[in-house]
Amino acid sequence: MTQVYIIAGVIILIAASICLVFIKQTITKRKKEKKRLHRALDKRAKDLVQMLNAFPPHFLPKDLTVFLFRCIVDSYEQLSKLSPKETEYLEHYKSFTAQMETAMRAPKTSEETTLQSSAQINEIRQYLNYLGRFSQKWMERGNISLKQYANYKDIIKKLITQLMVDNYIFSAKQAIQMDKAKLAIHYYMLGKQLLTKEGTIASKKRRLEVIDHELIRLEAQIKKQEQAEASAPAKSDGEEAEEEKQWQEFEEDANWKKKNVYD
């Protein structure tokens, strides 16, 4: 009978040990998962806030601004529940919630922001692509409806078109500074082609007017230069002969200097 008790005791001890190991592994796994989730949420929140600060004032339409605030608020809400002892998350949650409510009450504006450098344009374009992927994930998780996602996607597509036009305008201005009028016309024409696509003319009328004005001015400038070149007096045979003689003398002098250098 004693042996039976001993065997039963051993079995119980083994079972208890297995249970303790299993419980310990489960706790460790949960801690690791909690840390992983915390890092992911913290990074997401910081990336979203950085994105919000990177967009110039009035660049994002109201719908997209409110959506971005919703994403930030959601991240800090999860962080405040995951790590209640870290009070900064709760403070951020309250602060961005207030900012979101202000954005929701603000009237829609038709004011447009023109970006002024290729670096800024590229940075904003990357953020818009990130925001587009984020909205897709929210739709897949059921956080937003398919209709809302389609609206955000359409807004982002139009904003990226706007960025491309701004980039062409910026490149055209650089070409003008380098006195390359034909190259500037090329860039302005590329921007105009984007603007005149279906569904973009009405909302981008001001940009289209600016481009048309510059095209007229540059084309008139090129025409004037061509007329001036055509009406310039032709050089006489004597003048051309004298220039040819001077050029030959210059080449002979240059060859002599080169020979001395090698010697």
Image (tube, rainbow, N blue to C red):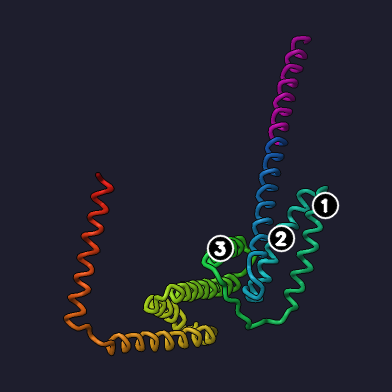
Instruction: Tell me the tag on residue 87.
Output: 1
Is any part of residue 215 visible from this angle? yes
Q: Which residue is mark 2?
A: 74
Query: At which x and y percent is residue 17?
Result: 72, 24
- Mark 1 or 2, which is nearer the eye? 1
Magenta residues (range): 1-26
Task: Say left or right for 163 vs 89.
Answer: left
Inter-mark Cα distance, 3 to 2 = 24 Å
Inter-mark Cα distance, 1 to 3 = 32 Å
Main secondary structure along the magenta-highlighted residues:
helix
Residue 23 shown in magenta: yes
Is any part of residue 136 visible from this angle? no
Q: Quadrant of the rendered structure where residue 150 is?
A: bottom right
Q: In the image shown, does 111 or 119 lie closer to the viewer? A: 119
Dot 1, crowdedness within 10 Å: few (<14), some or many (≥20)?
Answer: few
Query: At which x and y percent is residue 202?
Result: 52, 87
Pointer 1 and pointer 3: residues touching (CB < 8 Å)?
Answer: no
Q: Which residue is mark 3?
A: 123
Q: How many marks?
A: 3
Q: In the image shown, does 194 or 177 lie closer to the viewer? A: 177
Tell me the element at label 1: helix
Task: Say left or right for 163 vs 36.
Answer: left
Residue type, mark 1 in image: Thr
